Amino acid sequence: MIIYSGNQVIFKTTVSTGAKDSPMPTGKFAIEAERGDFFYNEESSEGAYYWVSFKDHGTYLFHSVPTDYNGNEIKEEAEKLGIPCSHRCVRMSKEDAKWFYKNISEGVTVSIH
């Protein structure tokens, strides 16, 4: 993932996007108001830190690599960064997700292709 301010690169990191059976939406989206520092999904038995919504108000997110119920990073999932394997979200390291959460505000346009 590359983040620009105008024509200048301000942030670059390796991410994982949607797996073949859970593809990412493509196009231009505006960052939505929904965000939080942690969530846990009982259905998938995974959580994540620093989530930010970009489509359908909490359905499609940028967030950290998955965690267990206690917030511990799932090592096997962290090792998949750079490989399409998510459930329609953009995964990144916890440190990078925190940067994104703190620096990318509501209304910022994102382009996914």
Image: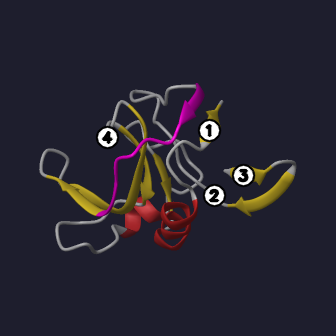
Determine whether label 2 and label 1 are within 8 Å by CB.
Answer: no
Q: Disc 3 and disc 1: Cα gap in Å? A: 13 Å
Mark 4 crowd level (few <14, some 14–19, many ≥20, 10 Å Cα): some
Q: Disc 2 and disc 1: Cα gap in Å? A: 19 Å
Kindly report which numbered mark, 4 or 2, lies closer to the viewer in this rendering: 4
Does 57 appear above or below 65?
above
- Residue 57 is situated, as x and y percent measured from the top left of the image, at 33, 36
Question: Which residue sits furthest right?
Answer: 7
Q: Which mark is residue 58?
A: 4
Q: Please state which of residues 110 and 15 is positioned toward the viewer in this rendering.
A: 110
* Residue shown at the point (53%, 54%) measured from the top left: 105
**Which residue is disc 1 drawn over?**
109
**Which residue is disc 3 drawn over?**
2
Q: Is residue 34 magenta?
A: yes
Q: Please state which of residues 80 and 16 is positioned toward the viewer in this rendering.
A: 16
Mark 2 crowd level (few <14, some 14–19, many ≥20, 10 Å Cα): few
